[in-house]
Image (tube, helix red, strand yellow):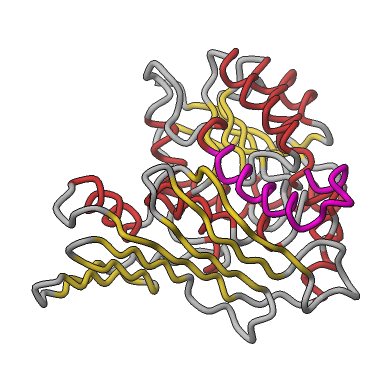
Amino acid sequence: MTALKAAVIGCGDVSAVHFEAIAKLDGARLAAVCDTDPGRLAAAVAAHGVPGFSDHASLIDAVGPDVVHITTPHNTHAAIAADCLGRGVNVIVEKPLAHTLEEGRRLVAAAKASDAKIAVCFQNRYNATAQAMHALLSSGELGAVVGASATVMWHRDADYYRSRPWRGTWAGGGGGLMMNQAIHTVDLLQWLVGDVVSLSGHAATRFLADTIEVEDTAEFVAEHANGVRSAFYATLANAVNAPVTLDIVTEKATLSLRGDLTVSHADGRVDVVPERVVESGGRAYWGVSHELLIADFYSRLGEAGHFWIDPEEAEKSLRIVKEIYRQSYPDALDKVS
């Protein structure tokens, strides 16, 4: 069989895990790279020995890729992905779905109108711990969910934003902490507990106000469709990148995620589900499961229907984040929505 042709659009930091995943795939090969920055593009061409392009349309016309991986700044996700879908090219796009709700809705519509598939990289759903939590909760053996909470206690400094200035802006990133870091945990919370139907929250810049215009700290209390309440807190002002925490209390057990998953049953039993450890050139806080999501997506390309983490599914976390912004910045809705 002819190997599927893959292309990476955007050769910045997170592209590293996509290059690694493509290299490990059977039946696929990297065929081209794309970046608007000449230096990054030249480095990627030299590292991978494939043609390079400065715009994605030229890449598609010249190479005809089967799958494109979009790892560009947030404000370009939706437009590039929609164009690729319109050309019949399958897409894997990094989170978030888009930098605005309007762009997110456009990509949802483009995905529904296209026969090509699209995945949004909420790879932490593939973590062994997340999969175990979802299976236990779905089985009903632990009883109904009573409540949940989550924290993201991480650290970013001014240099992190100066190295990629788009990250610290509404126009480039669509937000700060909640869009670029904590959205993964927001996604897990709503996936495991249930759709969020209402929330009360607040976002602010507590630590990096002299460097960024977006938030570095946020919190919310959410009501889920099943009547469960969850509490969430996140900040980039912590001294280190501490493990994400996610606690779900049920009628018969408490599930506590701290790297590994500990399930403490009401009868005294304690089960531990270890998380996978994968050596990667990527940063540890990206999680361990990009490779699994990407391999799963390629394996399903011949199936009918949409990929299970598609734009409609990814829009749920985007709406949660944007609702926090709407409540926090009522005088700047044109920038934050």
Q: Is residue 290 visible?
A: no
Q: Is residue 47 magenta?
A: no
Q: Nearer the viewer, residue 124 or 189?
A: 189
Q: Is residue 181 visible?
A: yes
Q: Nearer the viewer, residue 96 or 102?
A: 102
Q: Is residue 104 above or below residue 288?
A: above
Quarter where residue 257 is shown: bottom left
Q: Residue at x 43, y 24 (%)?
A: 301
Q: Is residue 139 left or right of residue 170?
A: left
Q: Is residue 129 above or below residue 208?
A: above
In what quadrant of the picture does the N terminus appear? top left
Numbered-mark total = 0
In what quadrant of the picture does the C terminus appear? top right
Q: Residue 276 at x, y = what percent? A: 34, 64
Q: Residue at x 21, y 61 (%)?
A: 251
Q: Is residue 337 above or below residue 271?
A: above
Q: Residue at x 39, y 16 (%)?
A: 304
Q: Nearer the viewer, residue 108 or 16?
A: 108
Q: Is residue 287 left or right of residue 267?
A: right
Q: What stretch of residues is rendered in magenta?
A: 314-337
Q: Residue 175 at x, y = what percent? A: 76, 54
Q: Residue 245 at x, y = what percent? A: 44, 71
Q: Is residue 336 magenta?
A: yes
Q: Is residue 233 left or right of residue 49?
A: left
- The secondary structure making up most of the magenta span is helix
Quarter where residue 298 is shown: top left
Q: Residue 214 at x, y = what percent? A: 81, 61
Quarter where residue 211 is shown: bottom right
Q: Nearer the viewer, residue 277 or 38?
A: 277
